[in-house]
Image (spheres, helix red, strand yellow):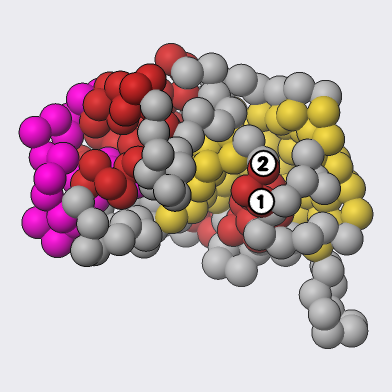
Amino acid sequence: MLEIEGLEFRYGERGLPGMCFDLEVAAGEVLSLIGPSGSGKSTLLNLIAGFLEPAAGQIRLDGVAIETLPAAQRPVSIVFQQHNLFPHLDLYTNVALGIDPSLRLTPTQVSSITDALERLGLSGLQQRKPGALSGGQRQRVALARALVRRRKILLLDEAFAALGPAQRAEMIGLVKSLVRENDMMALLVSHQPRDALIASARTAFVCEGRIETLQPTAELLEASVLPAVREYLGSA
């Protein structure tokens, strides 16, 4: 269980309101986060990952507080819309860097890379560089790199936004399988309501730096009584 309690982020400028989050995510769950741009979705992910420092509050994984750990020591992997692959390195090396930047890998670690590439449909492409891959394949590489890190928490910040609807659905299905198989949990930020329907039994609506509501996804998207949600969804 990932527990976020009273997690505050405050802007440096005086007079600006801060953000405060409370949330729970269970092992094996993919929880979607939707809401207007600037509402705090990416800020929440960056607080969990350790890229931003909270002003107050706790982040607990299985009851153990992790909010004081440096980013590199947190049980977190994150995949962005920009896949952050090194264009001059081949696919295998890009994935291996997720385990050890020195690339001094044990046989077990090498095997884990091979398994991840096979699981994500990238077998036989190990020597290709990112420029020779499609957009969907590059995101699969980024996901493989996150998988071999073997961290409990997977954060996806608009990770599939550049893909078409069919590829997004395929990647989300892959994420759900990987999360279940590896006893992980995932938070998925997306501006596409359909992504949340495919990915998550529950979805959180983030508005003005708060979790405004957390409901069953279909109920939130199809029958929400909250004006902010209806305004966000529009005719969607």
**Residue 190 x/y as whole percent:** 46, 51
Question: Magenta segment: does it hold 37?
Answer: no
Query: Which corner quadrant of the image does residue 126 belong to?
Result: top left
Identify the image quadrant of the N terminus.
top right
Q: Residue at x 44, y 49 (%)?
A: 101
Image mark count: 2
Mark 1 and mark 2 in contact? Answer it, CB < 8 Å.
Answer: yes
**Residue 22 x/y as whole percent:** 80, 42
Whether residue 62 is visible here, answered yes or no, is: yes
**Which disc, if any, is residue 133?**
none
**What segment carries the magenta color?**
118-143
In the rendered view, does 32 fall on the left or right side of 71? Answer: left
Q: Is residue 184 above or below residue 211?
A: above
In the rendered view, does 178 fall on the left or right side of 42? Answer: left
The residue indicated by pointer 2 is 74
Question: Magenta segment: does it hold 137?
Answer: yes
Which of the two residues, 22 or 50, is positioned nearer the viewer here? 50
Which of the two residues, 197 or 74, is positioned nearer the viewer here? 74
Q: Residue at x 39, y 27 (%)?
A: 106
In the rendered view, does 151 fall on the left or right side of 53? Answer: left
Q: What separation in Å lies between label 1 and label 2 (alpha carbons)?
A: 5 Å
User: What type is the residue that disc 1 sits on?
Assistant: Ala
**CA neighbours of label 2 inside 10 A, class few (<14), some (14 to 19), many (20+):** some
**CA neighbours of label 1 inside 10 A, class few (<14), some (14 to 19), many (20+):** some
User: What type is the residue that disc 2 sits on?
Assistant: Arg
> SS for tag 1?
helix
**Residue 71 x/y as whole percent:** 66, 51
Q: Residue at x 83, y 84 (%)?
A: 13
**Which disc, if any, is residue 71?**
1
Query: Which corner quadrant of the image does residue 181 belong to?
Result: top left
Query: Which corner quadrant of the image does residue 61 belong to?
Result: top right
Whether residue 185 is visible here, answered yes or no, is: no
